[in-house]
Image: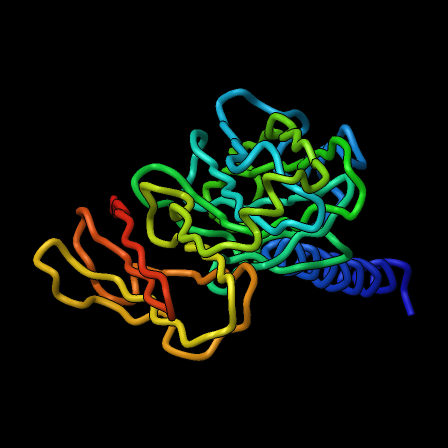
């Protein structure tokens, strides 16, 4: 076999290998990647650019204080940059992160990342997730980054940035908190205003049948979120307005259970 022919075979095989490897990484990263936050690295999403840029805004929003073991919902928002699609990686210094169904996130190695690049709505991309505080009081930190991509199949022109670290103060239960935990309560939905999903939390003093419904301004029932027996304690339910083809506006949600009822207002902004 001639030298030139051997070189052609080698180059052909190398090209096939290179394309296969490139395709693998493109597929892997399109379904998210972890280990890219300030918790573990200063490099961040360097597959979308060598350095972070302030053109991309990444914000973690949610409660700044929790009690030990308490679960809360947080929202990560990405704006700026090309923003044809966006992805993220979220991590916590302690406690645990949880996926909300339909949020576009998945869990991997204790961190969260996108299932696929997400399209923007009204100029931003949002990911909602749950965080459960650890069993020890103190300060904890949520870390994140976000990429804003042009979605052309390559990284040319993509941008990314770190989020400002979110500090959460975790407290032990006080006497006042214990009184609240042992009472009925309907909490304000979070986030509010919201698009398209929000979390409604409620507290039951005793076991009993629970009805939780959403109504429009005319009192017409929009959605029945809960209609079943529930044990005493704190509960959460996710309301996705996109499932009901709602228009932007003011709606109400009502909790009815044995010995207690309460109504609160929520605002949907498409």
Task: Tell me the residue at 66%/42% (across/down).
Answer: 67
Please state, as top left, top right, bottom left or bottom right, where the N terminus lies in the image. Answer: bottom right
Q: Answer above or below: position of 14 versus 46.
A: below
Q: Quadrant of residue 91?
A: top right
List x then y, in percent, for residue 259.
37, 65
Q: Nearer the viewer, residue 18 or 263?
A: 263
List x then y, in percent, for residue 121.
33, 45
Q: Nearer the viewer, residue 157 or 41?
A: 41
Task: Tell me the residue at 51%/40% (across/down).
Answer: 76
The reply, left or right, for residue 72 in relation to residue 95 is: left
The residue sitting at the bottom extreme is 228
Task: Tell me the residue at 46%/55% (across/down).
Answer: 201
List x then y, in percent, for residue 122.
29, 40
Q: How is the image coloured?
A: rainbow
The reply, left or right, for residue 134 in relation to residue 23 is: right
Q: Exactly how many numbered labels are in the figure?
A: 0
Q: Nearer the viewer, residue 70 or 35?
A: 70
The residue sitting at the top extreme is 54
Q: Answer above or below: position of 74 versus 233.
A: above
The reply, left or right, for residue 7 in relation to residue 96 is: right
Q: Nearer the viewer, residue 242 or 218?
A: 218
Q: Quadrant of residue 237?
A: bottom left
Task: Tell me the residue at 50%/38% (across/down).
Answer: 148
Q: Quadrant of residue 125?
A: top left
């Amino acid at each position: 076999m001639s030298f030139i022919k051997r070189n052609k075979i080698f180059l052909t095989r190398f090209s096939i290998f290179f394309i296969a490897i490139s395709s693998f990484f493109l597929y892997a990263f399109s379904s998210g990647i972890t280990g890219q936050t300030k918790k573990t690295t200063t490099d961040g999403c360097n597959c979308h650019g060598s350095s972070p840029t302030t053109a991309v805004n990444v914000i973690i929003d949610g409660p700044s204080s929790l009690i030990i073991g308490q679960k809360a919902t947080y929202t990560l928002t990405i704006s700026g940059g090309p923003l044809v699609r966006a992805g993220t990686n979220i991590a916590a210094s302690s406690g645990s992160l949880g996926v909300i169904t339909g949020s576009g996130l998945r869990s991997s190695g204790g961190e969260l990342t996108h299932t696929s690049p997400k399209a923007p709505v009204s100029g931003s991309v949002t990911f909602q997730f749950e965080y459960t505080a650890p069993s020890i009081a103190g300060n904890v930190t949520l870390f994140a980054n976000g990429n804003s991509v042009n979605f052309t199949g390559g990284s040319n022109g993509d941008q990314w940035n770190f989020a400002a670290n979110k500090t959460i103060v975790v407290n032990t239960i006080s006497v006042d908190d214990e009184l609240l935990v042992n009472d009925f309560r309907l909490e304000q939905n979070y986030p509010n205003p919201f698009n398209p999903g929000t979390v409604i939390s409620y507290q039951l003093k005793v076991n009993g049948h629970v009805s939780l419904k959403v109504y429009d301004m005319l009192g017409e029932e929009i959605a029945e979120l809960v209609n079943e027996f529930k044990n005493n304690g704190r509960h959460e339910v996710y309301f996705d307005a996109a499932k009901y083809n709602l228009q932007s506006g003011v709606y109400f949600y009502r909790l009815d259970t044995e010995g207690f009822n309460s109504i609160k207002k929520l605002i949907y902004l498409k």
